[in-house]
């Protein structure tokens, strides 16, 4: 390797599970097998040096629910531990599937998952207004009791009941980055799943896990910057980012400059918690150094988008050859 472009692929929820089927481990493996074929397509077409990161919302939710539901039998796991568990089983499925698909059509390559910690600032303002609901639903009375007993912040979740909410702080540093660098040339790495296990750093350097959710697109951006990647490829459900999304005047975008991203963000075109963090991550990546490109597209269109045929390309300056349609 060495002469190929470096690409960080951020896999969205649909690359790991189908929304409709029950989220069994077997069903997840079937979806991940299809995703691994697409990752293999990318390797076959371009030879890029790849690393993969992924979401974990439904998976970590499931682990947490199982753990909380069984609390009378065995103590519930803290949230950071649940994140670590989710990285483990998603990574395991990716390792197993890529080990099958790569040798058939490309060549045998080691694939390894790194249980990854990501440092967040203990003074991050997000800790003052936790917003991400996690775990079981409770009645208001139960929620108040938990709040008093455990010190958790509980909020009403869209008319469905009360839930614990945690902060979504900004990723500051990937703890295992030196190991990523050492392994990069030889291995396809699965890194910072679910945005990474959130940890804060004590004065003596000790790391302590916290209950928080780091946005996986922001963690992917951090990783792409740290690894001096050329392309940040964010794969989700939609082929292109749109303005006026789901309105009669919806317009799918072929490309956005950093300036346009800022404008559209301020005009509120991207839903918080879904498209907004993707556009923000893409914009930060395009901005941090000249010549860097982020692409947002659907999983199934990944190869076409890398060929420049579809997707939304985000770059510092207008992308060459792009014609607005
Ligand atoms: P993932 O699971 O892939 O990380 P999400 O499901 O959270 O991503 O976010 C992707 C979704 O964001 C799309 O499927 C789409 O429904 C929604 N979305 C919100 N705003 C926009 C927009 N302006 N353009 C395109 N998609 C949008
Ligand atoms: Mg999703």
Image (cartoon, grey):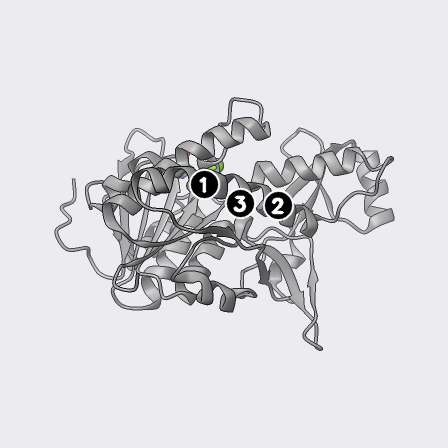
- Asked whether, in this view, residue 100 is left or right of residue 243, the answer is right
Residue 253 visible, this angle:
no
Residue 183, picture quadrant: bottom left
Q: Determine whether 287 is above or below 76 in the image.
A: below
Residue 72: percent from the left, percent from the top?
87, 35
The residues bearing labels 1 and 3 have C-alpha atoms spaced at a distance of 14 Å
Instruction: Return the residue at label 2.
Output: 132
Neighbours of disc 1 within 10 Å: few (<14), some (14-19), many (20+): many
Query: Which mark's residue is nearer the viewer, 1 or 3?
Result: 3
Residue 37: percent from the left, percent from the top?
36, 36
What numbered label is drawn on residue 75? none
Residue 161, picture quadrant: top right
Residue 280: percent from the left, percent from the top?
41, 54
Does mark 1 have its CB less than 8 Å from ligand 1?
yes
Instruction: Return the residue at label 3.
Output: 91
Viewer-side residue, 191 vs 155 = 191
- Asked whether, in this view, residue 133 is left or right of residue 313, the answer is right
Residue 71, picture quadrant: top right
Name the residue rendered at 66%, 29% in the picture.
159
What numbered label is drawn on residue 12? 1
Name the residue rendered at 67%, 75% in the picture.
205
């Amino acid at each position: 390797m060495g002469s190929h472009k470096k690409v960080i692929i951020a896999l969205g929820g649909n690359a790991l599970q189908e929304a409709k089927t029950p989220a069994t481990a077997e069903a997840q493996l079937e979806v991940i097998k299809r995703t691994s074929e697409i990752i293999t397509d990318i390797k076959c077409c371009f030879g890029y040096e790849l690393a993969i990161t992924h979401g974990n919302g439904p998976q970590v939710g499931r682990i947490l629910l199982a753990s909380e539901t069984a609390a009378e039998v065995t103590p519930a796991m803290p949230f950071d531990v649940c994140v670590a568990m989710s990285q483990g089983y998603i990574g395991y499925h990716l390792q197993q599937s890529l080990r099958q698909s790569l040798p058939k059509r490309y060549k045998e390559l080691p694939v390894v998952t790194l249980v990854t910690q990501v440092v967040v600032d203990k003074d991050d303002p997000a800790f003052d207004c936790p917003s991400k609901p996690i775990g079981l639903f409770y009645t208001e009375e139960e929620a108040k009791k938990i709040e008093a007993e455990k010190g958790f912040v509980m909020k009403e979740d869209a008319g469905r009941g009360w839930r614990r909410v945690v902060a979504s702080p900004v990723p500051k540093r990937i703890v295992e980055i030196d190991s990523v660098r050492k392994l990069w040339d030889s291995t396809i790495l699965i890194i910072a799943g679910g945005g990474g296990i959130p940890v804060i750093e004590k004065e003596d350097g000790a790391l302590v896990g916290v209950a928080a959710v780091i946005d996986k697109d922001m963690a992917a951006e951090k990783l792409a910057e740290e690894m001096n990647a050329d392309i940040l490829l964010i794969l989700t459900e939609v082929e292109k980012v749109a303005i006026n999304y789901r309105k009669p005047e919806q317009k799918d975008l072929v490309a956005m400059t950093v300036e346009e991203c800022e404008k559209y963000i301020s005009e509120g075109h991207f839903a918080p918690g879904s498209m907004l963090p993707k556009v923000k991550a893409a914009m930060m990546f395009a901005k941090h150094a000249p010549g860097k490109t982020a692409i947002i597209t659907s999983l199934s269109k990944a190869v076409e988008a890398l060929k420049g045929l579809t997707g939304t390309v985000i770059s510092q300056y207008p992308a060459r050859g792009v014609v607005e349609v």
